[in-house]
Image: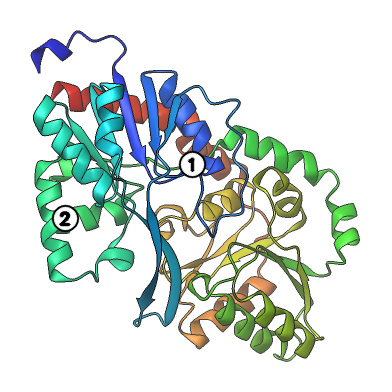
Amino acid sequence: MSNLHSIRTPRVTLVTNMLPPYRVGFYNEIARRVDLTVVLDTLSEFNRAWQTGTDDCRFKMVTQNCRSFIYKRHRQDVHYTERRQFHFSELTYRALRESKPDAIITAEFGFRTMWSLLYGAIHKVPVTVYSEGTLHTEGHVGLIKRMIRRVIVSQATRFWTNGPESTRLLESYGADPARVDEGMTGIDTTEWCAGVEEWRSRREAVRAELGLVGRVFLFSGSLSPRKGILQMAAAAARVAAEPDCPTFSLLILGDGENREWLEEWIRKNPGIKVVTTGFVQHPELPRYFAAADWAILPTLDDNWPLATLETLVAGLPQLFSIYNGATADLCHSDTGVEFDPLDERSFQTALSGAVRSSLDRVPQERIRDISEYYSASSQGGRAALSVRNAIRD
């Protein structure tokens, strides 16, 4: 691969399942530094209501529209079942052949990664595996899957992860930590912070319009068992029943399979102020974050949910689930409290303490540091350096 050392602008193909709106800024920043093609299985999936604008994309995009099927994922240990979509990615090799990359980035351990490794082996192209799973979200897989993943890891040149929790999973498959590049997640923090600050000037008007009272706790995510919506409702009821409990509200953004259950729970608990909005498109979210005081994401199983980062850079302290892969990176004494959403006492103690806490804003210095590290520009810089290291290796 010595002939690649002199490449000024490498051709890079990133192979992934879909294009969520929060990834566009990251990919655009990579595209400022390399010649980037993003190959998608599909633009979106059956359970995603977001609208991703592609007019401002700096990168080339290929949508394969691969065959797929819906299956149910069962997690007996954390008590939920969820429908997911599996893509065959049968057109990936052809897409790689047409894009002629000098380096490949491929997401996770499925068919798209196997095709990428095959192309890389034949054409002597380095392959970086982008793995977001953690020992909690993926460490329970069976023996055969673990064997396949160990083989994939042994053939990859480098790895991208969100942070230390994802890195530990790769190490369990035999990855050399020296070849792992962390921090490959984030949002366009500059745009997000500006949007929230603009709405903060109208914060009281928004709160009055929504009917919010007392300390406002924001939940942003799907209304599904995996996100802990059932546990959150139960904890809120217990805290509200405590003697001399200060007034608080729940502001719930999202939609999902537990929507009807939640509506019924709200009717049965009229003493708790709950405002639901349904699904909110990403550009409209800052309005609600500006209206809140704290946030809760009581997830039972999440790699590194960006709602956690959005909350922090919006200045909101939060309750961090121990099953959230971002907790290790973002939970500090001045950003919130860690808790176990499956432990009733832990959840109640954390929520009760937050209702009464004197912490009402993440310090500006912390917001600035986190915003810089997880900005699209910083991500893009780390990604481009990783690509060049992969080519050099």
Image side of residue 188 versus residue 212, left or right: left
Specify the label residue 297 is tagged with: none
Q: Residue 20, position in %: x, y?
A: 52, 44
Q: CA distance from mark 2 to mark 1?
A: 24 Å
Q: Quadrant of the N terminus?
A: top left
Badge 2 element: helix
Determine the image quadrant of residue 390.
Answer: top left
Q: Residue at 65% x, 39% y: name it.
A: 193
Q: Residue at 52% x, 34% y: name it.
A: 24
Q: Residue at 34% x, 49% y: name it.
A: 163
Q: Nearer the viewer, residue 17 or 363?
A: 17
On screen, residue 285 above or below 245: above
Q: Residue 66, position in %: x, y?
A: 38, 46
Q: Quadrant of the C terminus?
A: top left
Q: Residue 356, position in %: x, y?
A: 68, 74
Image side of residue 384 versus residue 222, left or right: left
Mark 1: amino acid: Leu
Of marks 2 and 1, which one's residue comes earlier in the chain? Answer: 1
On screen, residue 218 above or below 40: below
Q: Residues within 10 Å of mark 1 (few under 14, many from 20)?
A: many
Determine the image quadrant of residue 157.
Answer: top left
Q: How is the image coloured?
A: rainbow
Mark 2: amino acid: Arg
Q: Dot 1 corresponds to which residue? A: 19
Is residue 266 at all visible to an observer of this figure? yes
Q: Dot 2 corresponds to which residue? A: 149
Q: Residues within 10 Å of mark 2 (few under 14, many from 20)?
A: some
Q: Residue 172, position in %: x, y?
A: 15, 59
